Image (cartoon, grey):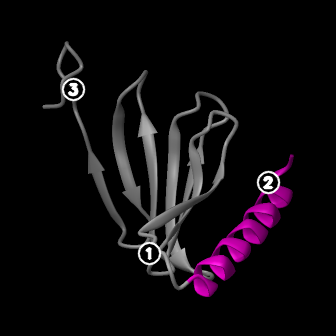
């Protein structure tokens, strides 16, 4: 499935989940995972506030590569993750233009 088709499917799933949520007066959902990847990790999470979190995983190493949070087309958070062999070494937020780097000791403990 290509990226555009995946986004269309996610959009349809989210619209269905949102409609179900808005029509349901008996349950309170803090969040609902609306789509999963092949490893059963949540790709899209709809929060009770109406915000959508989209988790993007690397096709090369299956690590979480980005998290986008927003409502409609407006992002309020857009973080990307960079790794060394297996540790997060940098998190960049494109919305706030902030970057946080991380260092590890010889036993892979953050310092």
**First in residue order: circle 2 vs circle 3:** 2
**Which quadrant of the view contains residue 108?**
top left
Image quadrant where one finds the C terminus: top left
What is the number of the mark on residue 3? Answer: 2
Alpha carbon distance from label 3 to label 1:
41 Å
The tag earlier along the polypeptide, 3 or 1, is 1
Question: Relative to residue 109, is residue 103 depicted above or below?
Answer: below
Query: What label sits on residue 104 in the rendered view?
Result: 3
- Specify whether 35 is left or right of 30: right
Which of the pair 18/87 is nearer the observer? 18
At 52% from the left and 35% from the top, the residue drawn is 63
- Looking at this rendering, what residue extends furthest in the top direction? 106
Label 1 sits on residue: 28
From the image, state whether disc 3 or disc 1 is nearer to you: 1
Q: Is 68 contained in the magenta span?
A: no
Compared to residue 71, the image places residue 35 above or below, namely above
Q: Residue drawn at (36%, 50%), measured in percent from left and top?
A: 91
């Amino acid at each position: 499935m290509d990226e555009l088709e995946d986004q269309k499917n996610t959009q349809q799933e989210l619209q269905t989940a949102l409609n179900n949520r808005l029509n349901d007066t008996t349950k309170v959902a803090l969040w609902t995972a609306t789509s999963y990847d092949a490893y059963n990790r949540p790709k899209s999470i709809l929060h009770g506030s109406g915000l959508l979190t989209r988790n993007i995983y690397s096709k090369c190493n299956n690590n979480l590569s980005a998290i986008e949070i927003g409502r409609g087309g407006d992002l309020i958070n857009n973080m990307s993750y960079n790794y060394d062999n297996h540790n997060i070494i940098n998190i960049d937020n494109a919305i706030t233009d902030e970057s946080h780097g991380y260092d590890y000791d010889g036993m892979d403990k953050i310092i």
